[in-house]
């Protein structure tokens, strides 16, 4: 680095060190706004995968309901379709996380449809 | 536990997510770590970036806007890239913002020149307080430093844009030729040419004053 470059750099660094408090504060605010984007992006990414996770869980539950219970014949097919309709309903997607509820539904369904 | 760790304000939404379950904490931890790394990176360069933008644009608010835009773009588009790539990427975005601002000003000046009674920023003096002598008591040494910096800024402002970019990125930011080429979006040969011409011109202009 020659003399001109060295002196230019020293002057520049000096001017950076002496930046006024108002500008420093605005830069900090700008940085925080940018960093909020990272967290917002993380939330967005999480919710992008939420429906896919819900559908995967719905598929697993559908399989359990179809082949897991002590049912027979056309009746069990109708029950399974009905259950699948419930679990595939996007409005009930939060309920998919309540596995115990669906286990109960699976146990209760044959009694309801046998009467 | 998240509640016992002091975290910056931007991490609040992530903390909220973590209360949903312990398993999610491990999922969110890399994102938190990424945010912390980005925070450190931006804090380390923001003041120099602002000064470079200020020299190029000669306007505080425009310089702040450019730096903020560059920060946002880096966080949105490249936050997940390896941190070693952030510096040239940030400066590339910043240089684009500076050029956009300069282009916008030229267009505005051309349009406004048609209007009667209009004086452009340059004619009316964009920085009208720059010419006003500073009455605050400055030590003689600091005054000499300020005058030298003012002379450097004036000379830099007169350089063609690409020469100015090459000089500031190489000397002020300390990027090597390859990083400067990445930041400027040109070849290393072009960087060397722009830089060499910039140094030559500055030496001619500042030689006497320095």
Image: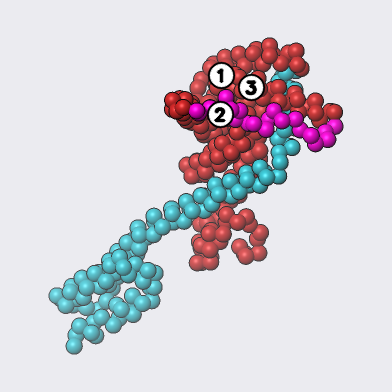
Chain colours: A cyan, B red
Which residue is labeled 2 in the image? B121
Mark 2 vs mark 1, foreground winner is 2
- Is B196 above or below relative to A74? above
The reply to whether discs 2 and 3 touch (Cβ–Cβ < 8 Å) is: no
For the record, the magenta segment spans B117-139
Residue B119 among those drawn in magenta? yes
Query: Is residue A54 visible in the rendered structure shown here?
Result: yes
Which residue is labeled 1 in the image? B160
| Circle count | 3
> What is the quadrant of residue B53 in the picture?
top right
Q: Residue at x 48, y 44 (%)?
A: B76
Mark 2 vs mark 3, foreground winner is 2
Rendered location of residue B79, percent (x, y): 52, 44
Label 2: state its secondary structure: helix
What is the C-alpha distance between the residues marked 2 and 1? 19 Å
Label 3: state its secondary structure: helix
Which residue is labeled 3 in the image? B156
Q: Residue at x 45, y 28 (%)?
A: B115
Rendered location of residue B31, percent (x, y): 53, 52
- Which dot marks residue B44? none
């Amino acid at each position: 680095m020659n003399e001109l470059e060295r002196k230019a750099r020293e002057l520049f660094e000096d001017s950076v060190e002496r930046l006024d408090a108002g500008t420093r504060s605005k830069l900090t605010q700008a940085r925080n706004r940018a960093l909020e984007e990272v967290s917002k992006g993380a939330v967005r990414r999480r919710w992008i995968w939420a429906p896919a996770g819900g559908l995967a869980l719905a598929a697993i539950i559908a399989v359990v309901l179809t082949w897991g219970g002590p049912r027979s014949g056309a009746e069990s097919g109708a029950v399974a379709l009905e259950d699948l309709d419930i679990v595939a309903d996007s409005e009930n997607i939060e309920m998919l996380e309540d596995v115990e509820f669906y286990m109960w539904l699976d146990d209760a369904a044959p009694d309801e449809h046998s009467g | 536990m998240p509640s016992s760790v002091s975290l910056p304000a931007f991490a609040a939404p992530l903390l909220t997510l973590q209360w949903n379950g312990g398993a999610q904490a491990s999922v969110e931890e890399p994102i938190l770590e990424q945010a912390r790394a980005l925070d450190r990176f931006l804090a380390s360069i923001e003041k120099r970036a602002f000064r470079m933008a200020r020299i190029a644009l000669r306007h505080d608010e425009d310089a702040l806007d450019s730096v903020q835009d560059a920060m946002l773009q880096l966080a949105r588009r490249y936050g997940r890239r390896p941190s070693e790539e952030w510096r040239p990427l940030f400066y590339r975005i910043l240089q684009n913002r500076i050029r956009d601002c300069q282009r916008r000003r030229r267009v505005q000046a051309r349009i406004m020149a048609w209007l009667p009674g209009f004086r452009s920023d340059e004619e009316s003096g964009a920085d009208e307080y720059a010419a006003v002598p500073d009455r605050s008591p400055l030590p003689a040494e600091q005054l000499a430093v300020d005058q030298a910096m003012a002379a450097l800024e004036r000379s830099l402002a007169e350089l063609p844009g690409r020469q100015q970019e090459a000089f500031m990125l190489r000397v002020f930011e300390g990027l090597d030729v390859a990083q400067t080429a990445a930041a400027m979006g040109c070849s290393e040969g072009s960087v060397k040419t722009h830089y060499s011409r910039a140094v030559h011109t500055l030496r001619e202009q500042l030689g006497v004053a320095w």
